[in-house]
Amino acid sequence: MSETSNSILLVGESGVGKTHFGAQLLRRLMQAPGALRMNGAATNLEAFEAALEQLDEGRAAGHTARSVSVDSVWPVIDANGCEADLVWPEYGGEQIKSMIENRRLTENWQKRIEVADAWLLLIRLQQTSVGDDIFTKPLADLRDLRIENHSVEPSDQARLVELLQMLIFTHRSTSKARHLPRFGVLLTCWDEAEFAANPSEAFEERLPLVSAFIRSHWKLPLIMGLSSLERPLSSVAGDEDYACMGPEHFGYVIKPDGTKDRDLTLPIHHMLTGDA
């Protein structure tokens, strides 16, 4: 990890848990020992303050408004004394959906793609639907399907691949870097599904087309599971354990080998050091 600004472009649609992860990660950096810790005063924390307050009371954070688009800078340091300024974006997930549907990037997003040192894609596997196509079902099975309507919508796999193509094209068109940024995938809300496989296997089984596309562009992408909250929280009724123990005692990641670790800073440390 070099002593410079390291910008991670966090990419995820609405409902994947970006805000909860950001708030929990920020709390870990400030209070809990891990692979990374805070090394100075962070800037532009307004977008996370409301989420932190909700979690302190054992309640789920509210939805990030579509208009929100803030880059927060967090100075961090690892156990070896290597320092970096982590640039963490917070934005409404609908912006990603709009980019895919309109096939157009705003100037702000073009800049983010150009300067990012790493891209981290957040996917909630349980939220994705796998369409009936030749990539997921044999042709013999497709012949027996009834056509309910004539409207055609891109599958979630096609939409994610198109999003990645937009990122790659924009980076190669605007960046002076010869190589693509480091890349990782976080499979969020891992506690909801209780996958038996490791993250890479679960990802390939559920979204084979997306997995194949990623591996065709990155030799060793980081793929980990993430449970920012460890349990479902209500936005109304507070969780007593959260309120008494503190949200920093909840949440975990699933490492590539399938083992669980409480250190939520691990994926970010991997992305910053280039170990992915």
Image: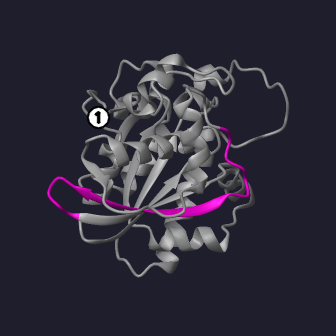
Nearer to me, 83 or 222: 83
Q: Which residue is mark 1?
A: 255
Q: Residues within 10 Å of mark 1 (few under 14, many from 20)?
A: some
**Residue at point 31%, 40% (across, down):** 32
- Picture coordinates of residue 193 (x, y %)? 49, 20
Based on the picture, tell me whether residue 76 belongs to the magenta stretch.
yes
**Residue at point 35%, 76% (across, down):** 178
Which residue range is magenta in the image?
62-82
- Picture coordinates of residue 68 (x, y %)? 68, 57
**Residue at point 62%, 36% (across, down):** 61
Is 167 situated left or right of 105 in this image? Answer: left
Is 188 situated left or right of 110 in this image? Answer: left
Nearer to me, 126 or 161: 126
**Residue at point 46%, 22% (across, down):** 244
- Picture coordinates of residue 28 (x, y %)? 37, 42
Q: In the current view of this chain or complex, which residue is farthest to the bottom? A: 176
Give the amino acid type for the residue marked by disc 1 in the picture. Answer: Lys
Nearer to me, 254 or 31: 31
On the image, which quarter does residue 144 sit in? top right
> Where 15 sits versus 84, above or below?
above
Residue 23 visible in the shown view: yes
Residue 134 visible in the shown view: no
> Where 137 sits versus 72, above or below?
above
Nearer to me, 239 or 171: 239
Q: In the current view of this chain or complex, which residue is farthest to the left? A: 80
Q: In the current view of this chain or complex, which residue is farthest to the front? A: 244
For the N terminus, the quadrant is: bottom left
Is 265 situated left or right of 203 in this image? Answer: left
Based on the picture, tell me whether residue 106 belongs to the magenta stretch.
no
Label 1: which secondary element: loop
